[in-house]
Amino acid sequence: MWEKNQQPVGNYKIEPLGLFRGLGKHPKMGRVKKRINPEDIIINIGRETQIPKPPEGHHWKEVRHDNKQDERDRQKYEKARKLHRFIDKIRENYQTDWKNKEMRIHQRVVALYFICKLPRHVGKEKYEDETDTVDCCSLRVEHIKLFEKINTIGENVVEFDFLGKDSIRYTNKVSVELRGNKNLKLFMENKNDDDDLFDPLGREENKDIALGTSKLNYLDPRISVAWRKKWDVPIEEIYSKTQHDKLLWAVDMATADYHFYNYEGEIVLHNVDDEGQQRDSDDE
């Protein structure tokens, strides 16, 4: 029941034991899929709903009552629903940024242009055990060809040929703005076919962004400040000026021998000696 209406339940069947097939040239193709037992299954169900009984002699791995499971999807769809308010502003911004001389901004503009024009997915980094599919921001040089003119299409033509989401081949020839064509030529200079087309938008930068986000959002700043003071590391190597100004409370509070406690009052951070070995504060 959903809002007092009956809704069909989807994806309730579990794939049987067998060989993995996958879509496209999947790295796991041909591997044996293990049998799924009740002990591998997590049941997420309402608190007032009767929990289904597992087969005799078995038990569920876990029973949860988490009504926030689809919260991220809800937020994503809500953001997509509101996007129409900002489309014109986004297009106006990337038209302005065409002339930006910074390569990272330059490449972001072209990627946004293709996402809007085609339209296509953003694309993300793939792991070694995933199918090698790409999209706008993860395109490689081998996935596009440039033409000055094709009679049936127009001038400044870009030909796309790559495996997209779910290994569905995408082929298309589109006429683009002259600036877009010139920028693509610039991005392809001195690169091999298997090099990323938009390299400043690629993996290493994303890793740096993820690391910086983790440091700011999930790590107590007093830990970073205490470590900095203990080893005389300049503050500018840890935080930018704006971040430093926002975290002055941590800079003032944490000393080189600052102790951090958990909720039970136990020390959870040990001092580190000059040889990099941890030692309990009580042993000092």
Image (tube, rainbow, N blue to C red):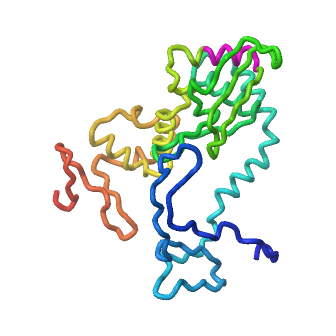
Report the residue that reaches farthest toward the top. Answer: 148
* Residue 276 % position (x, y): 20, 45
Decide if residue 235 is on the left or right side of residue 99.
left
* Residue 39 % position (x, y): 47, 76
Tell me the residue at 67%/17% (across/down): 146
* Residue 137 % position (x, y): 61, 33
Quarter of the figure that contains the C terminus: bottom left
Is residue 264 something one can see in this rendering?
yes
State which quadrant residue 252 falls in.
top left
> Of 267 and 116, which appears nearest the observer?
116
160 relative to 67, above or below: above
- Provide the residue span drawn in magenta: 176-185
**Was residue 60 drawn as part of the magenta stretch in this picture?**
no
Tell me the residue at 47%/83% (across/down): 58
| Magenta-drawn stretch, dominant element (helix, strand or loop) | helix
Is residue 248 something one can see in this rendering?
no
Tell me the residue at 71%/37% (across/down): 120
Give the total of numbered labels.
Answer: 0
> Of 104 and 10, which appears nearest the observer?
10
* Residue 115 % position (x, y): 71, 33
227 relative to 117, above or below: below
State which quadrant residue 230 falls in.
top left
